[in-house]
Amino acid sequence: MNSRKWVIRLCAAWAAVLTAIAVTVIVIDPYWHYHKPLEGLNYQGKNELYNNNGMLRHGDYNALIIGTSMTSGFSAGEASDLFGENFIRTTFLGEGFYILNENTKTALKHRKDLCHIIRSIDTLWFVTDAHWLGGNDYPGYLYDENPFNDVRYIYNLDVFREAVIPTIWASLTGQEGTADGEESADERADQYLKGSGALDRYERPEKNTDPADPAETEEWLSYVRDNITLNLTDTAEQYPNTEFDLFFPPYSILWWDTINQGGPGHIDRRIDMEQYAVELLLQCPNVRLYSFNDEFDLITDLDNYADDIHYHPNINSYILKCMKEGCHRITADNYRKYIARIREFYTSYDYDSLFPEG
């Protein structure tokens, strides 16, 4: 065989291999980038950064739970049963307002019948730039609309090894799929509360005696305004037929202790920021706003928490039921009383009592 024929055959063999890989990835599509999940395949992709966008584009749903780790304990099945809708849940760990809004818009674009969105408003991220991208390394080739960079998905060793092959094997052996993100309440509780308790994991900062700086406060309020308007209400106003149930998650009393340790006036400033966000959100007619920062018994019971902010999945279940019943809803008529109530509690709480040995 001469060298020219050998090169041609080698190139043909490589082309056949590459074509076979591409066809396999595109047909199975373990992260649902190109199409809906196929019947008979038990999908095993477990990378949320890959799963989420495909679920938003091609999932079977008309209602959505989206948020940070504050929403990871929600059960889409429980939400579907409560509200009589077909929910999916997409969680973006450690992300801010911008990433959540961009993915909310993806859902609204691809699901014209999307009627209901439940989303966390993490007061933790109030003081971030409105275009802050968070700390995760997103596979942008899956999230954008550019088909040419999909080569990084099609010829991705990790995708093939961690999702394609396990999906084929699970489908052949009858294993259940795991790509929908649903776990039982007990499994989720075990993951959240495994190991030591919240107090053991908490490192109390040193007490600062400097009062809150008024100029800094004005800057922080501008962050709140930009995040709420650009990454929440502007989108809600563009989709008036979609109902948005938004909630402030109940961080533990340890989180409030961190704020209090910051110095005089720092808790008042945090509450002022929350009030400003409330006033902006209440201007949007298709937004229903809930807060659980006045659930004082819950927040001060550290058995509910794995650390200073992450709570037991039972709390997620409680939040869903409150939304269904209209409990803890913040309205134009009651928000001032709500703000006064939490201000009184958090500014007068005996934080040192949390640390009897200190």
Image: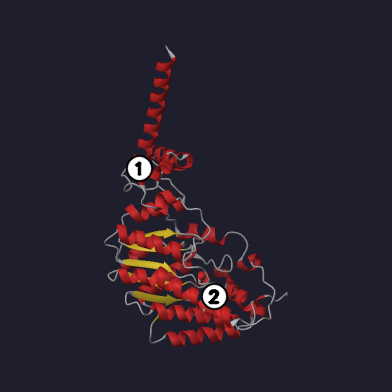
Residue appearing at x 46%, y 84% in the figure: 338
Q: Is residue 197 above or below residue 156?
A: below
> Which quadrant of the figure has residue 231?
bottom left
x then y, percent, for residue 43: 39, 45
Question: Element at badge 1?
Answer: loop
Give 343 or 231, whichever is nearer the viewer: 231
Residue 61 figure quarter: bottom left
Q: Is residue 76 visible?
A: yes
10 Å crowding of disc 2: few (<14), some (14-19), many (20+)? many
Give the residue type that dot 2 points to. Answer: Ile
Residue 31's disc is none
Q: Is residue 240 left or right of residue 275?
A: left
Q: List the residue tagged with mark 2.
A: 299
Please tell me in which quadrant of the rendered image residue 194 appears: bottom right
In which quadrant is the C terminus drawn?
bottom right
Q: Is residue 208 above or below residue 167?
A: below
**SS category of the residue bearing label 2:** helix
Pick the front one: 223 or 62:
223
Tell me if 104 is positioned left or right of 126 in this view: left
Residue at the spot of label 1: 41
Asked whether the viewer can see residue 327, the reply is no
Quarter of the N terminus within the rendering: top left
